Amino acid sequence: MFGRLGAPEIILILVVIILLFGAKKLPDMARSLGKSARILKSEAKAMKEEGNSSPQAPGANEQPPAQRTIQAAPGDVASSRPVNEPTDTPQR
């Protein structure tokens, strides 16, 4: 149904995107997308490492987990923030 996209089609798509969003907002949108991708990647890596850790016996040297920080993009010092990890025990 749909053929391959050639150079004229890609150029037309890019022109439509620029007309819809404006040239000034495109770098900000790309930057935000990059930050989101980095955060998603770091969280997925942390979850994978957490799943690979060996389980310990209950009560054996339990320490509260270290607080992690989501890293900001280089040059962006305002968006680093600590992450509060959920605990397994309910707090009431």
Image (tube, grey):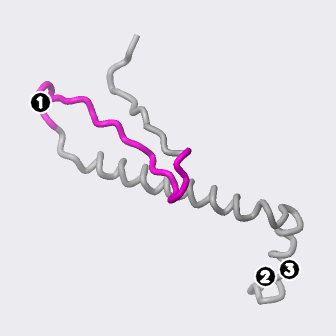
Asked if labels 1 and 2 touch by Cβ distance under 8 angstroms, the answer is no
Q: Is 18 in front, or is 47? A: 18
Amino acid identity at mark 3: Leu
- Left or right of 31, for residue 44: left
Q: Secondary structure at mark 3?
A: helix
Q: Which residues are magenta?
A: 56-78
Name the residue beneath numbered marker 2. 10
Q: Quadrant of residue 10?
A: bottom right
Name the residue beneath numbered marker 3. 12
Amino acid identity at mark 1: Asn
Please give the name of the residue rendered at 81% of the width and 67% of the height, measured from the top-left corner.
23
Lower sequence index among marks 3 and 1: 3
Q: Quadrant of residue 4?
A: bottom right
Lower sequence index among marks 2 and 1: 2
Where residue 60 appears, as percent x and y from the top left, is 10, 29
- Left or right of 1, for residue 39: left
Where residue 61 appears, as percent x and y from the top left, is 11, 30
Asked if labels 1 and 3 touch by Cβ distance under 8 angstroms, the answer is no
| 63 in magenta | yes
Tally of numbered tags: 3
Q: Secondary structure at mark 2?
A: helix
> Label for residue 61?
1
User: How would you rate the neighbour count of disc 1 (Cα within 10 Å): few for under 14, some for 14-19, many for 20 or more?
Assistant: few
Q: CA distance from mark 3 to mark 1?
A: 62 Å
The secondary structure making up most of the magenta span is: loop
Q: Secondary structure at mark 1?
A: loop
Where residue 45 appears, as percent x and y from the top left, is 37, 54
Q: CA distance from mark 2 to mark 1?
A: 58 Å
Query: Where is 74 relative to 8, above or below?
Result: above
Please give the name of the residue rendered at 50% of the width and 59% of the height, measured from the top-left corner.
74
Amino acid identity at mark 2: Ile
> Label for residue 50?
none
